[in-house]
């Protein structure tokens, strides 16, 4: 990543009029938000070619870049520029959404969604609802291409984590069977995990009579993920971590069981140990906040809590994303609440997401 004072180079068709507009080259935002563990950055491969043809997409990317630049330069004044780019992106999208390519429109909406989750607490806009309209209206054939497949993968991830932070069913409900790019084949197991997380979130609004049958189905499904979790390296550790976190989430929603239950503590420990095996420089770490949060909130071991603190701090030092600072504070707040609960009652019935909703009046930062 280039230093902030280096002169950025312009992309063809993307001649920024502000420092923020050129900062995709200076700071390479795409390297921070991709999830694919491949040499080719998928955002560069499929989103960058759209920039020259869409002022709205250019503004959406500049919105993200200006937000990040304000953090890297510790310059809050850049947030004014960011807001202007955000306004331009939304205004332009509203004017062209009926004539713009659905691929480009979805790319714009997901850039706004990602920026909202990483740099702000909550804009009050439900970007995923907009994504759903575009996906449904365009029809399945539109997405039967590499760019479409990639964008749906990004949507499925954000749909899953938002469902957790709001304890509501997924908005898009894309499931785990959406196609995947050959270069992203290792991600197939993660797509199945995201779909499973969404299924667990859907249990939050189900009638109690249905919980047992649905919970049992999901538990069996988690056991069948061993094939994907057996992968080695960063992908294998990430899928293992998701699997352990999913067990924790399932039993919290299904039975309201958490620490100090031995099963929960075991899953939390295994999850954190798998996450710690993935270098913080890995692109897959972009997908780690949810399992990290889920396991961290349930651990009561001092050494593991220290591991969590060091891990989140290391993730921030690489990415400098405000969402990670909020994640760190949210975890500390949940620990304090849950420790007090166990001290006074001997048990833990605290749902960590509900705790943050109560304290912060927002969902936990899990993206």
Image (cartoon, helix red, strand yellow):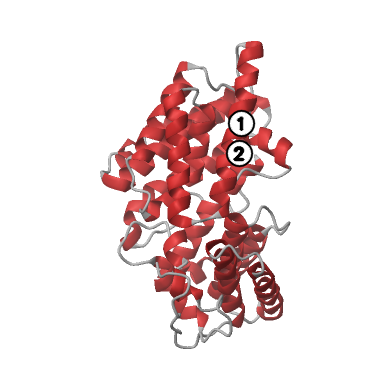
Residue closer to the observer: 317 or 168: 317
10 Å crowding of disc 1: few (<14), some (14-19), many (20+): many
Give the labeled residue for mark 1. Answer: 334
Classify 233 as above or below 83.
above
Residue closer to the observer: 284 or 246: 284
Classify 104 as above or below 229.
below
Q: Residue at x 33, y 41 (%)?
A: 237
Q: Residue at x 50, y 85 (%)?
A: 14
Quadrant where the N terminus lies? bottom left
Give the labeled residue for mark 2. Answer: 330
Is any part of residue 101 visible from this angle? no
Q: Residue at x 57, y 74 (%)?
A: 62
Q: Position of residue 185 (x, y in %)?
A: 33, 56
| For residue 16, side relative to residue 37 (left or right) | right
10 Å crowding of disc 2: few (<14), some (14-19), many (20+): many
Examine the image and state in which quarter residue 201 appears.
top right
Q: Position of residue 54 (x, y in %)?
A: 57, 82
Q: Position of residue 21 (x, y in %)?
A: 55, 78
Q: Is the Cβ of the residue at disc 2 closer than 8 Å to that at disc 1? A: yes
């Amino acid at each position: 990543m280039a230093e902030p004072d280096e002169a950025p180079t312009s992309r063809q068709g993307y001649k920024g009029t502000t420092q923020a507009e050129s900062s995709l080259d200076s700071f390479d935002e795409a390297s921070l938000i991709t999830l694919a563990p491949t040499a080719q950055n998928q955002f560069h491969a499929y989103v960058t070619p759209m920039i020259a043809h869409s002022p709205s997409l250019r503004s959406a990317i500049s919105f993200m870049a200006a937000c990040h630049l304000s953090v890297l330069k510790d310059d809050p004044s850049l947030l004014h520029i960011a807001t202007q780019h955000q306004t331009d992106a939304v205004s332009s999208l509203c004017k062209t959404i009926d004539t713009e390519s659905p691929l480009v429109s979805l790319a714009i909406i997901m850039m706004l969604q990602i920026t909202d989750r990483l740099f702000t607490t909550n804009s009050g806009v439900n970007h995923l609802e907009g994504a759903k309209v575009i996906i449904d209206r365009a029809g399945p054939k539109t997405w039967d291409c590499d760019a479409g497949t990639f964008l749906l993968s990004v949507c499925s991830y954000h749909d899953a984590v938002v469902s957790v932070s709001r304890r509501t069913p997924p908005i898009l409900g894309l499931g785990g069977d959406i196609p995947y790019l050959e270069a992203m084949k290792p991600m197939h197991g993660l797509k199945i995990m995201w779909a499973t997380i969404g299924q667990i979130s859907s249990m939050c609004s189900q009638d109690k009579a249905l919980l047992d049958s649905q919970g049992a189905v999901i538990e069996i499904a988690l056991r069948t993920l061993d094939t994907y979790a057996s992968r080695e390296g960063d992908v294998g550790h990430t899928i293992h971590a998701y699997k352990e976190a999913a067990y924790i989430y399932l039993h919290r929603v299904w039975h309201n069981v958490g620490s100090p239950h031995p099963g929960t503590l075991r899953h939390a420990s295994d999850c954190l140990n798998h996450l710690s095996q993935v270098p913080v420089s890995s692109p897959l770490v972009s997908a780690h906040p949810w399992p990290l949060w889920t396991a961290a909130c349930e651990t009561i071991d001092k050494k593991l809590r220290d591991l969590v603190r060091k891990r989140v701090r290391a993730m921030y030092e690489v990415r400098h994303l405000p969402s990670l600072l909020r994640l760190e504070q949210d975890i500390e707040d949940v620990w304090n609440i849950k420790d007090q609960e166990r001290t006074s009652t001997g048990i833990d019935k605290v749902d960590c997401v509900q705790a943050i909703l109560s304290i912060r009046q927002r969902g936990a930062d899990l993206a």
